[in-house]
Amino acid sequence: MNNRESLYIYYTVFRRRLFYPLISVLVALSICLSSALPSQAFDWVPLIFQGVQALQLSNMSDRQEVEIGKQINQQLLDSDVRLYRDANINRYVQQIGQRLVANSDRPNLPFTFQVVDDDKINAFATLGGFVYLNTGLIETAENEAELASVIAHEIGHIGGRHLVKQMRQKALDAGLLTAAGLDRNRAIQIGYQLARNLPGSRNHEFDADKRGLRTLTRSGYNQTAMVSFMQKLVKKGSVPTFLSTHPATGDRINIIKKAINTQPSNGNDGLDNSTYKTNIQALLRS
């Protein structure tokens, strides 16, 4: 018997020894899944798959988040979100935003700040560092620190990956998660719907306030601007969408005040009202 024949016989025997135990395991597994309690076996499998996919969403890379954010942004711009094109206003908002990003929880994320041509007092954020500020909100703020407080809050949502978590929960609720993963187009559509509907979450809003206040403080802005802006809007009697979700705005104000008292800061930037009006002069003229 030559070496080639010996190797062939060895391989055949080895394959058979491996094959039969494998078949036994598969048969035993099929019997377990199909016997006695078939309903329980059927219910556990999708739950396991959903748990795996939920973990994948929660561990989405920065690159994936930015790419999906870009596509959500394009859907928003293709729908009813119209950008305000004045270069000076956009440059000013970008400067404030990037100053805050440098002191945020995700300073390496490529944030994009966009001004929306809308008189409503509103702001929101999507995946991958995309932040939107209505012209109505910019006009309502009395100084740069107040505007910065809103931007810092939206950055806080991105820092906490709140929209990613909401997407995961919505996909689970709708039964869209499979072992193969959440379809990319569906993920984009869910993100778009969440951005437009601005659903509230008590824990997420508190967390964005906490993160936003920390970012505002690190950036040297006056801490009380976050409180003064919220109070101003409450006194108007018409709380904007981004503040109207639970928890109640009054509760948020009280918690922010306590946080300021426990972590005082000497930062006093952004309180010059006249300088702010000069910086947004193009918007006030339009």
Image (cartoon, helix red, strand yellow):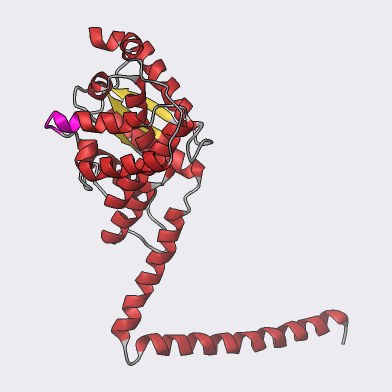
Q: Residue furthest right?
A: 2
258 left or right, relative to 64: left
Residue at image coords 33%, 78%:
42
Residue 253 position (above or below residue 179): above
Residue 207: give x, y in percent of width and height. Answer: 36, 47
Residue 237 position (above or below residue 178): above
Q: How many marks?
A: 0
Magenta-tinted stretch: 233-238
Q: Is residue 18 visible?
A: yes
Residue at image coords 50%, 41%:
63
Task: Please identify the quadrant where the N terminus is shown.
Answer: bottom right
Camera-side residue of 182 and 66 = 66
Task: Please identify the quadrant where the C terminus is shown.
Answer: top left
Residue 20: give x, y in percent of width and height. Answer: 59, 89
Write down the quadrant of residue 80 in the picture. Answer: top left
Camera-side residue of 167 and 141 = 141
Write down the quadrant of residue 249 in the picture. Answer: top left
Q: Is residue 70 visible?
A: no
